[in-house]
């Protein structure tokens, strides 16, 4: 056996005073894979009376804390609420934005007549229900006043209200386009009065703040899941560019982005094609009363809950998200269309629970515009990210001050193979021994102080489809 030169960090070779000297080497202590707890970031708008200024990354642990930090009823508050309901143990940070120079969306609710039979007026603002008791003999003005009073005590709602002559005007708390996607509906059991909505949603909101401002603020941080309420091409392109930058080989702080859409299916698939990123997922749930930004927050929280990067998210529930009515739900053909065009559909399972069908990314084509399934599933990029993390941390632990000699490549390869085998044991990678000849560690031909490695990673795929044939025997 060839002799090895034992190196010491704290005991110099030049000492001459007699003694028995021992130092502690902790580089060999860790033999396991690193933990994979997921950190989630929400970028959304705050209200002026929130206690936390804009562009200050802040950890959030509860609904009440989010309301205080960003203002009750703010977009940031409501997204935090949706995320925490979906995953109460979420590691959540928010980097809030102030409103831009845009316009606030609004809508009107017109009440006319006089109640002849008592009953209720249930008003739905997104997935929030506001209930007003109507008593026989109430005038339109009285019902409208009661309506406003019921809204005024609900500080968590995303709108403020004014009333005049039986007309309630609802105004979004934020400027921008996102509140345009808050649905409106009502149910009326009282007789003698009528309720007329100006439309099925708020309208008129314009000009969102620039998400890139917040992303620049958190560039040096590590967030595994980033959720945005903005689902237009410009905002998602900015998110894609950010994720490409922080996830690349130089920064190595990888993450995935989550947004949601509830427009027509053709509009959604067009948007996915414009983004085409293996790191961005667009959730789709047609007909839900839950605003799409709350849907995105809930979806992101569920992604962050699953620490095994290779395990599929199929059937996981998005607690707190409204199940759309049966006529609005996606049919089988529509779900297949989503999955073929970079859209991650949701469906309604037992107990009227909204659940994930399959978590796919918007990536459908390579740089040459050829159909490509390499990064179809979100689990693929998450597995690659974790594999890189495991390899990187092992090399950092074992070789923090290593000399580069002819022995070094073999030692490094041994450690990398051990990491890959442990990933194989956890079914994150597979066929490691079959591919071990492809694990190459060699000295660089140009830089005498550089070591290069080629690491085969056969990721474990999810079991998404099972097909069986039943043969009839008579």
Image (cartoon, helix red, strand yellow):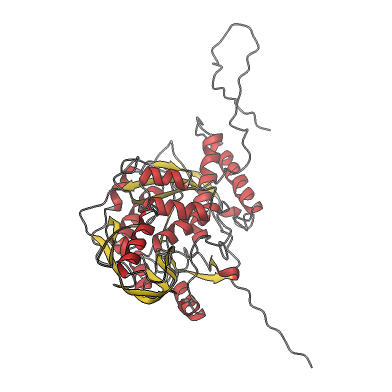
- The x and y percentages for residue 296 are 43, 59
Q: Quadrant of the N terminus?
A: top right
Of all residues, the one furthest to the front in this rendering is 137
- The x and y percentages for residue 122 are 43, 68
- The one of 339 and 353 positioned closer to us in this rendering: 353
**Which residue is located at x 60 percent, y 55 percent?**
428
Of all residues, the one furthest to the bottom in this rendering is 474
Q: Is residue 164 rendered to the left or right of residue 23?
A: left
Q: Quadrant of the C terminus?
A: bottom right
- The one of 326 and 258 positioned closer to us in this rendering: 326
Of all residues, the one furthest to the left in this rendering is 101
**Which residue is located at x 35 percent, y 44 percent?**
219
Of all residues, the one furthest to the top in this rendering is 17
Residue 42 in sight in this render: yes
- The x and y percentages for residue 248 are 40, 49
Residue 250 in sight in this render: no
- The x and y percentages for residue 336 are 49, 76
In the depicted structure, whether residue 406 falls above or below residue 70: above
- The one of 428 and 90 positioned closer to us in this rendering: 90
In the depicted structure, whether residue 292 falls above or below residue 190: above
């Amino acid at each position: 056996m060839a002799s090895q030169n034992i190196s010491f960090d704290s005991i110099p070779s030049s000492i001459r005073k007699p003694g028995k000297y021992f130092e502690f080497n902790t580089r060999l202590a860790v033999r396991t894979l690193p933990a994979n707890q997921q950190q989630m970031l929400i970028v959304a708008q705050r209200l002026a009376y929130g206690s936390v200024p804009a562009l200050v990354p802040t950890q959030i642990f509860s609904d009440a804390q989010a309301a205080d930090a960003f203002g009750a009823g703010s977009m940031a508050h409501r997204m935090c609420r949706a995320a925490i309901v979906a995953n109460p143990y979420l590691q959540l940070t928010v980097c809030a934005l102030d409103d831009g120079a845009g316009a606030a969306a609004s809508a009107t609710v017109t009440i006319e007549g006089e109640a002849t039979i008592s009953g209720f007026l249930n008003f739905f603002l997104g997935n929030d229900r506001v209930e007003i008791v109507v008593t026989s003999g109430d005038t339109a003005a009285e019902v409208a006043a009661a309506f406003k009073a019921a809204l005024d005590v609900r500080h968590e709602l995303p709108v403020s209200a004014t009333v005049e002559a039986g007309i309630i005007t609802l105004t979004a708390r934020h400027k921008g386009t996102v509140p345009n996607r808050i649905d409106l509906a009502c149910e009326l059991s009282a007789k003698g009065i009528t309720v007329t909505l100006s439309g099925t949603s708020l309208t008129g909101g314009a000009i969102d703040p620039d998400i890139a401002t917040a992303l620049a603020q958190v560039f040096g941080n590590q967030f595994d899941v980033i959720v945005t309420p903005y689902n237009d091409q410009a905002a998602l392109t900015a998110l894609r560019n950010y994720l490409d930058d922080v996830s690349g080989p130089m920064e190595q702080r990888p993450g995935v982005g989550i947004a949601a859409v509830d427009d027509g299916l053709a509009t959604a698939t067009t948007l996915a094609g414009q983004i085409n990123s293996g790191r961005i997922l667009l959730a789709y749930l047609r007909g839900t009363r839950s605003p799409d930004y709350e849907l995105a927050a809930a979806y992101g929280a569920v992604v962050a809950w699953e620490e095994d990067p290779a395990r599929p998210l199929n059937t996981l529930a998005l607690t707190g998200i409204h199940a759309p009515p049966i006529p609005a739900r996606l049919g089988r053909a529509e779900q297949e269309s989503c999955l073929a065009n970079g859209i991650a559909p949701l469906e309604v399972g037992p107990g009227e629970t909204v659940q994930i069908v399959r978590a796919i990314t918007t990536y459908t084509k390579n740089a040459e515009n050829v159909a490509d399934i390499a990064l179809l599933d979100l689990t693929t990029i998450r597995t690659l990210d974790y594999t890189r993390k495991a390899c990187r941390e092992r090399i950092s632990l074992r070789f923090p001050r290593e000399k580069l000699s002819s022995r070094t490549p073999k030692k490094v390869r041994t450690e990398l193979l051990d990491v890959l085998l442990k990933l194989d044991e956890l079914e994150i990678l597979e066929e490691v021994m079959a591919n071990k000849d492809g694990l190459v560690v060699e000295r660089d031909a140009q830089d005498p102080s550089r070591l290069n490695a080629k690491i085969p990673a056969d990721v474990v795929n999810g079991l998404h489809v099972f097909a069986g044939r039943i043969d009839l025997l008579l």
